[in-house]
């Protein structure tokens, strides 16, 4: 009988999980309650190890071709450069941070899914589920209100920081919210005094001011602010972004044509286990971090790469389910991967 994995959530983590499982010949359904992919830059960078892992399943070249290479980070205090960290010493075919808006990463992952004959089932929501030793019975609610009962062998919650899967499990999400607000702006700017291939961190007595290149002329800027006390930090206006640039950034830098303006707080939280019987949590559903450096997206995609080959081994009868436990020794991956070859799509 065909084994089925139901994936809840079709952001970068869910689509990575789906394409990796499909690559190994595992039957998959992936659902997403939103009607379309994100149109925001959100997770902005793909790091070397993520690109290496993408190479295993169809190649990273579409991502590299669509992205922009950041090759160094400059640290500045006042008018002085106090440090420069170059990435050319990274032992990888990809010795850089690949700046790529999450909207583009999701587009490319969805195109990769299509090569396996898979599509994301959008406007489909996980209503309820119950798990047993033999699998998971899930009720899916479609956009027209119709409910469908699905029997899956495993369910993977890739449904973000406010995960319905995690909440239904009652899995504790331990950690803290830091007592400061942040502003984020994805904008076009002129007057950047560094090469566009370099990110900048400006140390100011009021706090940090960070500039990440997205593409020539387009940047993400970040700055920490005093806690506002609001339930959610407000999105800044372009005028407020420019005032922050003038105060903490380099002289002569002008922002215009904003693409995305938002405020956020840094959360650091994680679950005690990624596995709950036949149910798994991955990405932001299992752990949340500061968004600096794309930690959440990259660690979440690597969750998916890690779990996919383990589940594929179980489906093929090559391993017991214990290989999928949180405590699995990482070195087992090298041994198992030698015996696990992708099936032709």
Image (spheres, helix red, strand yellow):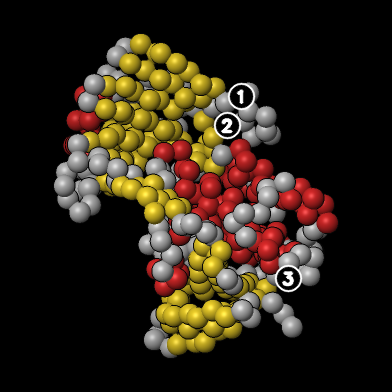
Image coordinates for residue 102, horizontal then vertical, percent: 47, 50
Image coordinates for residue 181, horizontal then vertical, percent: 25, 41
Between disc 3 and disc 2, the foreground one is 3
- Residue at the spot x=32%, y=36% of the render? 222
Looking at the picture, does residue 96 appear above or below residue 308? Answer: above
The image quarter containing residue 108 is bottom right
**Label 1: which secondary element:** loop
The reply, left or right, for residue 4 in relation to residue 130 is right
Image coordinates for residue 208, horizontal then vertical, percent: 30, 28
Q: Distance of mark 3 from mark 2, alpha carbons?
A: 36 Å
The image quadrant where one finds the N terminus is bottom right
Among the two numbered marks 3 and 2 on one chain, the one whose residue lies closer to the N terminus: 2
- Mark number, residue 315: 3
The image quadrant where one finds the C terminus is bottom right
Kindly check if marks 2 and 1 are in contact, taking CB atoms under 8 A apart as contact: yes
- Residue at the spot x=43%, y=76% of the render? 125
Kindly check if marks 1 and 3 are in contact, taking CB atoms under 8 A apart as contact: no
Kindly check if marks 3 and 2 are in contact, taking CB atoms under 8 A apart as contact: no
Query: Mark 1 = which residue?
Result: 88
- Mark number, residue 96: 2
For this orientation, the residue located farthest to the right is 339
Q: Distance of mark 2 from mark 1, alpha carbons?
A: 7 Å
Among the two numbered marks 2 and 1 on one chain, the one whose residue lies closer to the N terminus: 1
- Residue at the spot x=53%, y=47% of the render? 299
């Amino acid at each position: 009988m065909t084994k089925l994995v139901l994936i809840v959530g079709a952001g970068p983590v869910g689509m990575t999980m789906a394409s990796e499982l499909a690559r190994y010949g595992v039957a998959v359904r992936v659902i997403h309650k939103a009607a379309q992919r994100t149109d925001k830059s959100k997770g902005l960078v793909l790091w070397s190890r993520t690109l290496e892992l993408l190479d295993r399943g169809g190649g990273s070249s579409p991502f590299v071709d669509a992205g922009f290479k950041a090759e160094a980070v400059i640290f500045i205090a006042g008018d002085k450069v106090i440090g420069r960290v170059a990435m050319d010493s990274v032992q990888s075919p990809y010795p850089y941070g690949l700046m790529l808006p999450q909207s583009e990463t999701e587009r490319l992952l969805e195109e990769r899914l299509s090569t396996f004959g898979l599509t994301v089932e959008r406007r489909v929501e996980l209503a309820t589920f119950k798990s047993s030793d033999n699998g998971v019975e899930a009720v899916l609610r479609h956009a027209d209100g119709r409910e469908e009962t699905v029997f899956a062998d495993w369910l993977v919650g890739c449904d973000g920081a406010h995960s319905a899967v995690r909440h239904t499990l009652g899995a504790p999400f331990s950690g803290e919210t830091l007592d400061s607000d942040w502003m984020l702006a994805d904008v076009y700017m002129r007057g950047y005094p560094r090469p566009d291939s370099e990110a900048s961190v400006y140390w100011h007595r009021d706090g940090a001011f960070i500039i990440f290149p997205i593409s020539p002329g387009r940047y993400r800027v970040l700055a920490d602010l005093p806690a506002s006390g609001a339930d959610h930090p407000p999105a800044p206006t372009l005028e407020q972004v420019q005032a922050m640039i003038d105060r903490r950034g380099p002289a002569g830098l002008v922002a215009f044509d904003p693409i995305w303006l938002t405020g956020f707080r840094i959360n650091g939280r994680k679950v005690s286990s990624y596995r709950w019987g036949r149910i798994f949590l991955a990405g932001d559903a299992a752990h949340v971090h500061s968004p600096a450096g794309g930690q959440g997206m990259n660690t979440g995609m690597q969750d998916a790469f890690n779990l996919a080959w383990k589940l594929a081994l179980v489906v093929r009868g090559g391993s017991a389910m214990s290989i999928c436990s949180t405590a699995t020794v990482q070195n087992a991956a090298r041994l198992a991967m030698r015996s696990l070859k992708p099936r032709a799509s």
